[in-house]
Amino acid sequence: MGEEVACNMTEMPLKVPHFVLVHGIGGGSWCWYKIRCLMENSGYKVSCIDLKGSGIDRSDAKTILTFDEYNKPFTEFMSSLPNDEKVILVGHSAGGLSLTDATHKFGKKIRLAIYLGATMLKTGFCTEQDVKDGIPDLSEYGDVYELEFGLGPDQPPTSALIKKEFQRKIVYQLSPQEDSTLAAMLLRPGPIKALVSARFEEGMINCDEVPRVYIRTTQDRVVKPEQQEEMVKRWPPAEVYVLESDHSPFFSTPFLLFGLLVKAAASVGIY
């Protein structure tokens, strides 16, 4: 009898952990190419999302005016998942807004939400403190943005892109030169009006029931360490990990990042 049980157990297939990776503003699924390779070579299932106007999605960022519109590809992806599947979400930078939205709407499908140098605000941009903590302040570097005005020149800008001459200094200062060169070729304007409109309400499940991990990026010049610390303090996650990296650890410290993602997933039981 014992031998039969052992045999049946060995025949039971292990469920492969499914990581879903969400990029930050101006990026795309291409940002994750190193991490995706490491994960898939290690047997994990990986999905990388292109939000609207990002990556290979050809929508014009300056015409994307609401967060729901910008986030629609991710929302549709989460909706399409079977009800019995639980995924591990990883959001970088502004991608943290997508994760929080998902914890409100799809909490039962999320095993863990991992915020990577990301905006982590429980209800989005509702207060002055939310804006201070969650929106990058790059004013110390001067006039760094190329702005577009989809609603006309007399209205606030609808999209923005860091000028090429500032990208390496601000976003990729510790990353390999070839990766910052690749990024300069692929970065696209991000729909800033849509992002700052992000507001979240409790859904069918309390978002606090979804386990969260924050990975701090200590040399980050975009979402600065003090902003990360404040967001962690205001909405404490289950764990906080630390990476000595710039704003783009998927380029600057991919092996260490991969190790932390697996460690975080293991903490909630990935099988």
Image: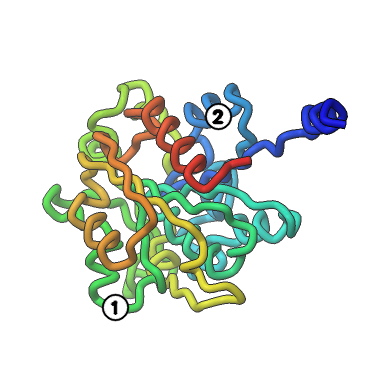
Answer few, some or many: residues within 10 Å of disc 1's Cα (few below 14, many 20 plus, some between 14 and 19): few
- Residue 271 image offset from top left, x and y in percent: 63, 40
Name the quarter where the N terminus is drawn: top right
Q: Left or right: where does residue 264 sit relative to residue 6?
A: left
Q: Left or right: where does residue 243 sit relative to residue 95?
A: left
Q: Is residue 120 above or below residue 239?
A: below
Residue at the (14%, 48%) spot, across then down? 141
- Using the rendered image of the protein, determine whether residue 214 is visible from the camera's viewpoint: yes
- Residue 120 image offset from top left, x and y in percent: 37, 60
- Residue 258 image offset from top left, x and y in percent: 44, 31
Q: Residue 39 carries which label?
A: 2
**Residue bearing mark 1:** 127
Secondary-structure class at tag 2: helix
Q: Is residue 117 above or below residue 99?
A: above
Q: Which amino acid type corresponds to the residue marked 2 in the rendered image?
A: Met
Answer few, some or many: residues within 10 Å of disc 2's Cα (few below 14, many 20 plus, some between 14 and 19): some
